[in-house]
Image (cartoon, rainbow, N blue to C red):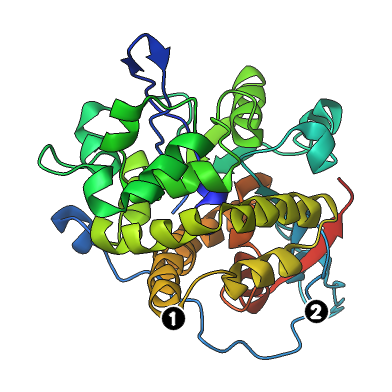
Amino acid sequence: MLRLPWLRSASIPRVGGACVLAVAALVCGCARTAALAAKPEPARIPVSIPQPLSIPSHGILFRIVPEEATAPATADASAPETQSPPPRASSYLFGTIHFGNDEELGLSPELLASALSSSFTLVNEIDLATPGGGNLDRYRWLPPEQSLSTLISADGFAMAQSLLPQIPPPTLQRMKPWMVLALLEARGEQAGEQTLDDRLQRIASERGMRIVHLETAEDQLRALDCIPSESQALVLEERLKAPQIMREMSERALTHYRGRDLDAWLADVDRMVGLDGESKDIEMRARRCLIEERNQRWLPELLALLDQGGCYIAVGAIHLPGEHGLLAALKHAGYRIEAEPL
């Protein structure tokens, strides 16, 4: 269930006359390019954050308030009268999910649109209005000398076909194991214009809001592909032996989201039900790429944006909870966090 929060659609090639998903996902890398390596080391989320942090235990929308914005002013009669700068405006942090309909998520289009009303800047993960180019195919598709059926068993490939009947076999053969896992985690749904992230960016664009992206499509795909295909295939093989476990986890993810209980969702992800020791180790490496390392890379820019105020930050919900989550990092950076109804 690591890949689910970052599922995205990109180009949709046609194979045998059928539209097929070419997943380009975000959300979530291990290897940096030479240009990125030249950048300063990003601020790191502390391994251990002092407790208690007084972070709301439930919610998917949070008001992020600078502490000094609410601190009472102290009058000093002896000081000359000067005009103090206005306090920084609050911002909002919204955890999105990339599958399920509004009823399953407990949301409405009206609520989604109104939540942006007091913000000037939308901050999301990538530019969803610009399709990824062919130079990103190396992250999505296996090289010509490989095929999915050479990485997993014949029974596993047959099961993948039966679970994803909308994907023609030639296309399924080309998919890297992480792409297949992402689709299975999202119940086979192909992300499109109705995802929360897409709708928020469209609303913000129509309102003329400034839109800031935390990373590029290549950053996200590199993170999803940070584990070698041979290792990814071990996890996929195990998942295909007991596909009902993934279906149950997907349904629980929707239940946790609808109940606004992100801590329970993260705990469910961390249990990695149905995986053996080696596969769990692989998934933990993927988790570091998808969640922790991306949070660390985003944090400096997020803090700068929050310093400006008036931002509405919309990122995958699984980035928010936990010791290494964004809520803990922002609380540690001195912000007050309040859950908002949504």
Residue 1, located in which quarter of the rendered image?
Answer: bottom right
Residue placed at 30% from the left, 40% from the top? Answer: 140
Numbered disc in front, either 1 or 2: 1
Residue placed at 34% from the left, 28% from the top? Answer: 169
- Label 1 secondary element: helix
Local crowd size for mark 1, using a 10 Å CA cut-off: few (<14), some (14–19), many (≥20): few
- Callout 2 amino acid: Ser
Q: Position of residue 113 (x, y in %)?
A: 78, 29
The furthest residue to the top: 17
Residue 327, located in which quarter of the rendered image?
Answer: bottom right
Q: Position of residue 180 (x, y in %)?
A: 42, 44
Compare residues 252 and 79 and report the one nearer the observer. 252
Q: Position of residue 13 (x, y in %)?
A: 33, 19
Position above or below: 244 against 312 = below
Residue 30 seen from this side: no
Position above or below: 330 against 181 = below
Q: Position of residue 23 (x, y in %)?
A: 41, 35
Compare residues 177 and 54 and report the one nearer the observer. 177
Q: Which residue, given by chain and number where applicable, does mark 2 sit on? A: 54
- Callout 1 amino acid: Gly
* Alpha carbons under labels 1 and 2: distance apart: 34 Å
Q: Which residue, given by chain and number where applicable, does mark 1 sit on? A: 277
Residue placed at 44% from the left, 81% from the top? Answer: 277
1 or 2: tag closer to the N-terminus: 2
On the picture, is 114 further left or further right than 1?
A: right
On the picture, is 12 further left or further right than 133?
A: right
Compare residues 239 and 183 and report the one nearer the observer. 239
